[in-house]
Image: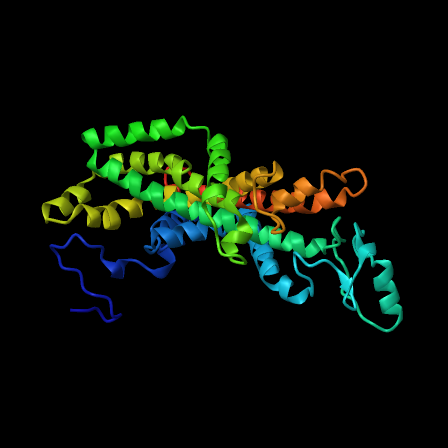
Amino acid sequence: MEHNNGLPKKNPLSLQLDLKKFSAAQFEKATDEEKRQQDVMSESTTFFKDGMRKLSKNPLAMGSIVVLLLILVGILILPSIVPYQYDEILSVNGKRDKSAKNLAPFTYSEMEQKYIEEGGSRFPHIFGTDEQCRDYFVRVIYGTRISLAIGFFASLIVLIIGLIYGSISGYIGGRTDLIMMRIVDIIYSLPDMLVIILLSVVLNETLKFPSGSFLSKLGTNMISLFVVFGMLYWVGLARLIRGQILSIKENEYVLAARTIGAKPTRIIRKHILPNCLSVIIISTALQIPSAIFTESFLSFVGIGVKAPMPSLGSLANAARSGLQSYPYKLIFPALMICLIVLSFNLLGDGLRDAFDPKLKR
């Protein structure tokens, strides 16, 4: 039953408010504090979407993403624009240009200037040339390609091995966990640089790759680096995953999954690992600059990528001999290493702030 004004009639025994006794003027607007309380009760969202929303509000992390995207687009597109190869010795009309040695940025050799005066066109050497008359800009671009590829590939190896090992150790527990963690302690005690040097010497004598293949261009030093990442560098992630699983597997929803007969692999994949997603994302993002820095250091000391294939570390190593005469040769690869490592570190910090539920925001 309703009143004449359309409002429902109050039952005498009901505890609800009698709306006919109230006018619109008696209802006050919500205060700012009440509005903030309403924001807390916002619509539900997924863990990933919520983390990405918080990440988008971090200016340093977003700036790092922009820098990394620009670098990635540059190393993919620029080699098709610049008409030089990373191992190409400059020549003019089929003749080797010996005067193109150690040119400054945006300068031409004597043969190139003569060729231009005769009506020819020549693409500028943006970063100059090296001591073997090769375009330095293209070599920096290819060196960035190699360093980033090694960083991503090494991080993928660490992620896969550490995820599997840590999940098995943490979920099974008991004596199995004890044995697996003692193996991790033994691996921690191995000197990684010594292992890389020994492996590079052994693999150089035993492995023979087809001539002209990508693996032959990388050389056995980089293969040994990948092997060491697969042998040694996953232990940190495995310990993090193991610690997370030890605490998560005691929750009620894991017990409920066991009760209905779910297999351990399904419990780990569907119930436990999604709750470790923040640790996985953060650790992987921080592992990439660590791998790039390790590769750059090894190339700098001469046990990195096989010549003439460049990497940022090998370019910096080659620039040491002419540091006083040609300092810009060291600046370009060093600046690229700093940009990549700093961007990934800032992005990793932003991912930690966005996806770690234990941090107050």
| One can see residue 306 in this view | yes
**Residue sitting nearer the eye, 329 or 317:** 317
Q: Residue furthest bottom?
A: 119
Q: Quadrant of the C terminus?
A: top left
Q: Which percent across, then down, holds residue 104?
A: 81, 51
| One can see residue 57 in this view | no
Quarter-of-image position of residue 85 = bottom right
Query: How many numbered marks appear?
Result: 0
Q: Which percent across, then down, holds residue 298?
A: 56, 38
**Residue sitting nearer the eye, 113 or 276:** 113
**Residue sitting nearer the eye, 337 or 304:** 304
9 on left or right of 319: left
100 on left or right of 45: right
Q: Which percent across, then down, holds residue 206?
A: 45, 44
Q: Which percent across, then down, holds residue 48?
A: 37, 52
The residue lying at 15 percent from left, 69 percent from top is: 1
83 on left or right of 206: right
169 on left or right of 144: left
**Residue sitting nearer the eye, 61 or 221:** 221
The residue lying at 50 percent from left, 32 percent from top is: 193
The residue lying at 36 percent from left, 55 percent from top is: 26
According to the image, what is the colour scheme of the structure? Answer: rainbow
